[in-house]
Every structure is written in structure tokens, then in C-alpha cells.
Image (cartoon, helix red, strand yellow):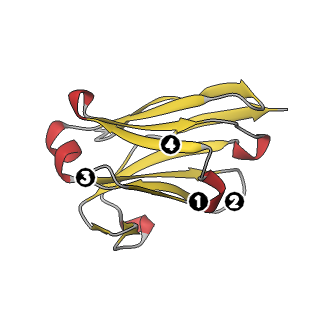
Amino acid sequence: QVHLVQSGGGSVQTGGSLRLGCTAPEQTYRLYCFGWFRQAPGMDRQRIAHIKREGDATFAEFAKGRFITSRDKAKNTVYLQMNSLKPEDTAIYYCAADLRCGEGGWLIQDSRLEYWGQGTQVTVSS
């Protein structure tokens, strides 16, 4: 059973925008911190953003100014809004959640995060 259900993604041209969603059970949404990651073919998984329970978010350098992450309490959903997309943003995108979070990020290795979404493909064409 998938604990985090991802939505959104797809194909877009350079400069376009996409929004990804990550829906969790109510208790998970309320108590956990969430993060966004991506993995391109042949590449290591890359952190994108981290958002705390209170909504404070931090971003990887490449995402600053282009990506926004937010939480929607009414929908138990965390979003990743991606703007000004580039071909190098093409990857499978994942959300994750865990209780072990601190200022600016996780307190554990990414590989040990408790819950992961199923992943969604984002393709940016030039």
C-alpha cells in the first residue's frame, strides 16, 4: 500500500511550469516533515526541497527562485510548484516524509526516510 500518493507531472516545453502533489493520510500530513527529490537516468538522487510541519521550507541551490513547496491542510497535500523549467530538470520526482527533521533538512540519511511516494515523471523538452 502506497502511503504517499503523488500526482501531477508530465511533459512541458522549456520555460513552462508544472505542479506536483503529494497526498498523505491526515496524521502523516499533520506530524511529518516532507521533502522532494528527483533522479535522472544514470544520475544519483538529488534533493530539491524540504518543508517542515510549520511550512518553513529550504531549497537546493538549483531550485531557489524557480521552485516553491507548500502545504495544504485542507487536502493533506504537499505541493511542488516548478517554474521556468529546463531540459535538465527532466527526471522522476519523488516526495518523502519522516518525523526526523530539523532546521533546514533531515536528521537522517535520505535512504532511511520512512515514507516515499511512487514517483512521477517530469519531462522538459527544448
Q: Residue 5's image quarter?
A: top left
What residue type is disc 2 on?
Met
Q: Which residue is mark 1?
A: 46
> Which mark sits nearer the N-terminus, 2 or 4?
2
The circle on residue 36 is none
- Measured in 3D between alpha carbons, the distance from the residue under mark 2 to the one under mark 1, in whole angstroms, is 8 Å
- Measured in 3D between alpha carbons, the distance from the residue under mark 1 to the one under mark 4, in whole angstroms, is 16 Å
What residue type is disc 4 on?
Ile
Disc 4 secondary structure class: strand
What residue type is disc 3 on?
Arg
Q: Say if 34 sits above or below 44 in the image.
A: above
Q: Nearer the viewer, residue 11 or 104?
A: 104
The circle on residue 43 is 2
Q: Say few, some or many: other residues with alpha carbon within 10 Å of mark 3 (under 14 / 14 to 19 / 20 or more).
A: some
Q: Residue furthest front?
A: 65
Q: Say few, some or many: other residues with alpha carbon within 10 Å of mark 2 (under 14 / 14 to 19 / 20 or more).
A: few
Q: Quadrant of the C terminus?
A: top right
The circle on residue 68 is 4
- Measured in 3D between alpha carbons, the distance from the residue under mark 4 to the one under mark 3, in whole angstroms, is 16 Å
Residue at 62% x, 44% y is 66
Q: Are marks 4 and 3 in contact (CB under 8 Å)?
A: no
The circle on residue 53 is 3
- Measured in 3D between alpha carbons, the distance from the residue under mark 3 to the one under mark 1, in whole angstroms, is 22 Å
- Measured in 3D between alpha carbons, the distance from the residue under mark 2 to the one under mark 4, in whole angstroms, is 23 Å
What residue type is disc 1 on?
Gln
Q: Residue 29's image quarter?
A: top left
Query: Where's residue 100, x and y in %?
Result: 26, 67
The count of marks equals 4
Q: Nearer the viewer, mark 2 or mark 4?
A: 4
